[in-house]
Image (cartoon, rainbow, N blue to C red):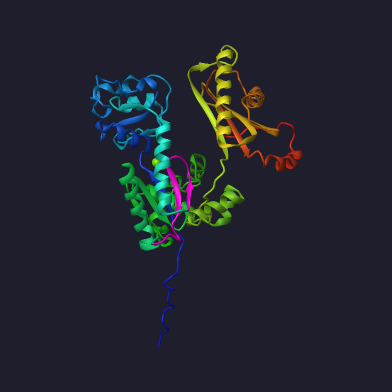
Amino acid sequence: MTSAPKPTPHNATTRRIAHLDMDAFFASVELLRYPQLKGLPVVIGGGRNAQPQPLDDLPIDKLPLSQFARLRHYTGRGVITTATYAARAFGIGSAMGMMKAAALCPDAYLLPADFERYRDYSRRFKAIILGIAPIMENRGIDEVYIDLTDVPGGQREGGRVIARLIQKQIFLETGLTCSIGVAPNKLLAKMASELDKPNGVTVLFEADVQQRIWPLPCKTMNGIGPKSSEKLRNLGLHTLGDIAACEPHWLIEHFGNSYGAWLHAASHGTDERPVVTHSEPVSISRETTFERNLHAKRDKAQLGEVFTQLCERLASDLRHKGYQARTVGIKLRDDTFQTTTRDISLPAPVADAKAIRQAAGIALKRAPLERPLRLLGVKLSRLVKPGQAQDDTASAQNLDLFTDTQQPI
Ligand SMILES: [Mg+2]
């Protein structure tokens, strides 16, 4: 006689985490007001002169295509923020220089970015999700994690039923599509949301890791950047399965204690991070790519003006969010694309433009300024709420008045 298998309690819940990513978000929002561009290659990221030309009294959704800017006429150093799927078919992608994209698809239509509008749609789709599943972690303007574990119906078909409901509701109320991955944790959910884009739902279970995750290239995992992925490749590891097959101590030997251990766990699909509903910003930054290279000496006045503006905008960002900053940093990129950062840790937090400018100025003086610059950025980190600043002062005793670190980019 064989003993009967232990029954699984019918009310058992397993962790079900969704990652939702809006499909070509900025571009899709633009297509809502310019439906005549649907199905065509469109990129977002032009300046004001990429605004479609109005015609007589025609409403904007009736403007003929001739009134829209084309990528081929673009000159400058702008970078694409989003491309429609039709544009991606030409090899165009986010963060690509506009001139490079113009070479790939000169006929693509170009629109300026309208962040105000994207933020508005972002608030709307997130409010729809919260109405269905209240445990949501903001991951930026167009993506969130959602904990479906205890949502009524959240376990049905491993989360697929709720995911489809969220997708449908967002589409009905905004006209926008998204892709959702549901998995036992954030790490796998994030990968799953990429597996069936656009407008897909992918459900993964622990048991699927071997079949669905291991064949993927290392770099598809969030947390394995270009540098690590190159190092892995040099060690003969090309897929996540290759990493999973390594002994943990071997990974630690090559990648250090924490990253080596993480690689082992992540390649086996393990990730315990909770879905965090209230996140504090880690840093706030602003940067500008110049229309022509500027030299620290020869273009001192112009550079100084941009620098001050960046600091003023950051001060206003801080004010809006109610934070102060303990670290002020600068980022430079020179004409050879060499990027340098310098950080200044301050004994007391700063919030106003003048104090930020002063600290950033000190950081800038420590950077190499011989070569012409193409980009200047200012970053505020170690953010604190004014009330918290007090507690921090005690630990600040260990800090030198100013510390200077150079971080690899
Ligand atoms: Mg997206």
Q: Position of residue 190 (x, y in %)?
A: 43, 49
Which region shows up in magenta?
Answer: 135-152
Q: In this view, does 409 lie above or below 134?
A: above
Q: Which residue is drawn at 26% across and 26% down?
A: 59
Left or right for 175, reference 147: left
Question: In the image shown, does 54 or 30 lie closer to the viewer?
Answer: 54
Left or right for 335, reference 402: left
Does the magenta run of residues contain 142?
Answer: yes
The image quarter containing residue 66 is top left
Tell me if residue 73 can be seen. yes
Image quarter where the N terminus lies is: bottom left
Image quarter where the C terminus lies is: top right
Q: Residue at x 60, y 20 (%)?
A: 369
Q: Position of residue 147 (x, y in %)?
A: 46, 55
Does the magenta run of residues contain 320?
Answer: no
Question: In the image shown, does 226 or 146 lie closer to the viewer?
Answer: 146
Left or right for 218, reference 400: left
Tell me if residue 409 can be seen. no
Q: Is residue 74 above or below residue 2?
A: above
Q: Which residue is drawn at 38% across and 55% down?
A: 212
Find the residue positioned furthest to the bottom: 1
The image quarter containing residue 387 is top right
Find the residue positioned furthest to the top: 298
Q: Which residue is drawn at 38% across and 50% down?
A: 180
Q: Position of residue 308 (x, y in %)?
A: 58, 21
